[in-house]
Amino acid sequence: MKTPSFWNSRNLLSTVLLPLGWLYSGATALRLRLHKPAMVNVPVICIGNLTAGGSGKTPTSAGIATLLKHHGFNPYFISRGYGGRLSGVIVDPSHHTAQDVGDEPLLLSRTAPVSINADRYQAALKAISCGADILIMDDGFQNPSLHKDLSFLIIDGKVGFGNCRPVPSGPLRENITSGLKRAQAAVIIGEDTSNVRPLLADLPIFQAHIKPQTPQDTSSPIIAFAGIGHPQKFYASLQECGFKLIACHDFPDHHFYTEAELSSLIAEAAKEQAQLYTTAKDFVKIPPHLQSSFNVLEIQIDWTDRPALEKFLLKQIN
């Protein structure tokens, strides 16, 4: 789904939906309380958040895996494979499609192997049997099936916790106080314009930015589209690179594109003599025979104080 704009304030619609939000957060709290997490014999790092919608978990997961590989670890991602039809497999990017394993696992497989299973414990066992000596959960902070040794809460500095109300009246997946008690650190992505830092109690906080890799040629007008939680962040990155956006098309998060939708975008770009740009997460869902018509804005996470993060990370897992 697209992240609702009314989640940003305590308006009438949010208030009407608040009783449903109490039920949702209560069910989450009960599930976490009743389920005893299983343990494995390698460290488990969870890259999670307290809110629904995109906050930067996937690029953060890739960035953490890159740091671990630099220090000699053999990390594997574990994922439920949201949107995919397969389970119990290690993602093979040369063979699997996003329809097989989900868009985010396919994207993460460019950095490290990914074990797919709706049961995170089984995904962990599979990864360990393949040689993983450390595991990274991309999302799953509210999933109690597997014990986490280290949990990072990823927060979009511009959005923060929105109106601080639970889904569907706001973006919260659970109560802020209870969530903070289970986390060991937080990562704020971008400038903290929402003033979320004072809400994070005594958690160590690391600052990062999503850095786009600017293409060599930004002179052509472009049409952009994205199926992510906050597509406006993608469009802003394109403008920061110097592109002139003449049209933007939003799709629901994790949307699988039809040939008709893609053909319509190609026809629009031809008519306007523009290039088409999308995210790497969306690109992996485009059929290979159409991919030449689309461009990708690649991104990576840029740590404000990488040495401090590495020191903290290694201390927690060793």
Image (spheres, grey):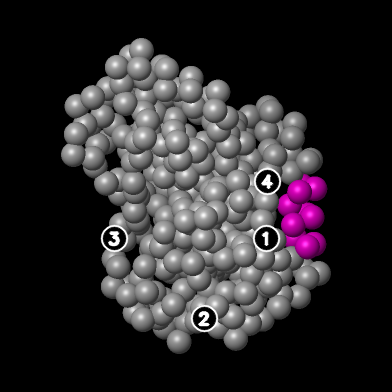
Residue at 35%, 71% (x, y): give it: 67
Residue 44 in view here:
no
* Mark-to-mark CA distance, 1 and 3: 37 Å
Residue 99 at x, y percent in the picture: 60, 46
Disc 1, SS? loop
Task: Kindly identify the amino acid type of the residue bearing the numbered disc 2.
Answer: Gly
Residues rendered magenta in the picture:
22-31
User: Sequence order check: which comes first, mark 2 or mark 1?
Assistant: 1
Task: Report which residue position mark 2 lands on.
Answer: 131
Residue 264 in view here:
yes
Residue at 78%, 54% (x, y): give it: 26
Which numbered tag is attached to residue 87? Answer: 1
Residue 288 at x, y percent in the picture: 45, 40
Magenta-drawn stretch contains 21: no
Indicate which label's residue lies in the foreground, 1 or 3: 1
Which numbered tag is attached to residue 166? Answer: 4
Residue at 34%, 79% (x, y): give it: 71
Residue 102 at x, y percent in the picture: 58, 50
Task: Kindly identify the amino acid type of the residue bearing the numbered disc 4.
Answer: Pro
Residue 161 at x, y percent in the picture: 54, 47
- Crowding around mark 4 (Cα neighbors within 10 Å: few <14, some 14 to 19, many 20+) is many
Rendered position, 19 above or below 208: above
User: Sequence order check: which comes first, mark 3 or mark 4?
Assistant: 4
